[in-house]
Amino acid sequence: MDWCSTFLTKVKSGKLTVGVIGLGYVGLPTAIGFNDAGFNVWGVDVSQRTVDMINAGENPTGDPDVDNIVPAPGTERWNITTSSAEAVPHCDVVLVTVPTPITHDLKPDLSYVAGAGRDVFQAIAKGSRTIVVLESTVYPGVTAQTWQPIIEELGLTIGEDLEIAYCPERFNPGDPAHGVRQVARVIGCSNPEVGAALVSLYQR
Ligand SMILES: NC(=O)c1ccc[n+]([C@@H]2O[C@H](COP(=O)([O-])OP(=O)(O)OC[C@H]3O[C@@H](n4cnc5c(N)ncnc54)[C@H](O)[C@@H]3O)[C@@H](O)[C@H]2O)c1
């Protein structure tokens, strides 16, 4: 079976493993949503406090909608860690939901996108074809412009070792009509097979 058929079969059977990098307002409800949908989830945050709270079943974000839905300790298919190196090798797809603030001179600060991307790419096994999706809010072109040089520097090849895509999160915390499970999503990638694989995943 080719990699795309394998991915689609894993989505249907729930055998797929989803990584979420950055467990804040966007990442935590996203990770919970995929766990609820039956998938194996690996969540990563660089903040030890965030990881400790989630592992205690507590909500580290300020979003009250998340208060009662953080999985209890010991929940199946739910793994939370500070280490991308530990999480990423388990994952078929990795969603990157890190901050995109602005600098003091009002330019987009893409350092989190670059740093989290590097952590993920360093942990990808050659030939695994892991799909890495940027969900942070950025302007057009950022996914390729920021990530491709790092991927090349690490000696990885898009289309063989990994795939990259963009799927901006558009939800509005506190607004029930535009929750993380309601808003329509837009997926951008250069390989239509990757797009089809991601449509099947996000539909869940
Ligand atoms: N909050 C919203 O309402 C909202 C809605 C739509 C889109 N967005 C976009 O989503 C993105 C994330 O926003 P947010 O509000 O969830 O941010 P947040 O600050 O709530 O959460 C980001 C998390 O990423 C973690 N992090 C930073 N670098 C990391 C790394 N290298 N590896 C692992 N974890 C790392 C931080 O510790 C933090 O917990 C931003 O681009 C934002 O613009 C936010």
Image (cartoon, rainbow, N blue to C red):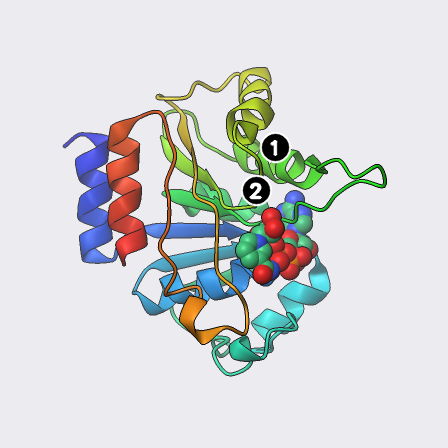
| Three-letter amino acid code at the position of disc 1 | Arg
Nearest the eye: 54 or 27? 27
Quadrant that contains the N terminus: top left
* Mark 2 / mark 1, whichever is N-terminal: 2
- Residue at numbered disc 2: 85
Marks 2 and 1 sit apart, C-alpha to C-alpha, by 11 Å
Describe residue 81's horizontal placement relative to residue 198 as left or right. right
Residue 15 position, x and y percent, is 26, 54
Residue 128 position, x and y percent, is 36, 31
Tell me the tag on residue 200: none
Q: Are marks 2 and 1 in contact (CB under 8 Å)?
A: no
* Quarter occupied by residue 81: bottom right
- Residue at numbered disc 1: 118
Mark 2 vs mark 1: in front: 1
Q: Residue at x 35, y 55 (%)?
A: 184
Q: How busy is the neighbourhood of tag 1: few (under 14 within 10 Å), some, or many (20 plus)?
A: some
Residue 30's place in the image compared with 94, above or below, is: below
Describe residue 11's horizontal placement relative to residue 60 as left or right. left
Residue 159 position, x and y percent, is 35, 21
Residue 142 position, x and y percent, is 56, 30
Q: Tell me if the residue at label 2 has its CB under 8 Å from ligand 1.
A: no
| Three-letter amino acid code at the position of disc 2 | Ala
Q: Residue at x 38, y 65 (%)?
A: 181
